[in-house]
Amino acid sequence: MSRKKIVVPLSESGIQKIQDELTVYRKWQEEKARELAERLAALGATVASIRFSRAIYTGKKDVHVTVEELPNGYKVKADGESVLFIEFGSGVTYGYGHPEAGEFGMGPGTYPDGKGHWNDPKGWYLPKSAGGGHTFGNPPAMPMYEARKAIEQELPKIVKEVFR
């Protein structure tokens, strides 16, 4: 909706016309805001899905990325047992590097509560139920972090497209 100049007489019918125009404009704004939120969520889900699928991870990748509609927008959600290991990395060799790990209580030695073999220089073996195999951990792939960064980067462009 382009800029619009409304000229009406200051009368009962003129004021009613202004109210009607504002009602139409408010509805347009709400529709466009919903479209913007949907496009941003779709972008985030796409970036996260691609990064989860391409992540280096020895165990079983069981990540499922979804977009959920909320009353006032959308939510991008990643489910699965491997989500945190892929997002934040694991192991003494690779468990560093996510810029927000500390904010979320993640990082080397935090799972499970500093126990286990996370700092074993020989690595460790994953149970068969988790895909099996020897590992030294995996680097943080940061799919959700990078999805947020992509949304922030593309926001001005998408806003212009949606509200043109």
Image: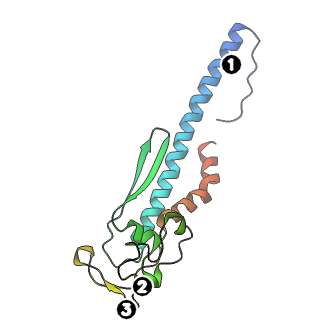
- What quarter of the picture does the C terminus occupy? top right
- What quarter of the picture does the N terminus occupy? top right
Marks 3/2: CA–CA distance: 9 Å
Q: Residue 119 — which label?
A: 2
Of residues 115 and 137, the one nearer the viewer is 115
Q: Amino acid at mark 1?
A: Ile
Q: Quadrant of residue 4?
A: top right
- Mark 1 vs mark 3, foreground winner is 3
Residue 52's spot in the image, x, y percent? 41, 68
Q: Is residue 156 left or right of residue 61?
A: right
Helix, strand or loop under label 2: loop
Give the residue pinned by disc 1: 18
Residue found at x 46% / y 38%: 71
Q: Quadrant of residue 83?
A: bottom left
Which comes before the other along the chain, label 1 or label 3? Answer: 1
Residue 99's spot in the image, x, y percent? 57, 70
Of residues 147 and 120, the one nearer the viewer is 120
Marks 2/1: CA–CA distance: 69 Å
Give the residue pinned by disc 3: 122
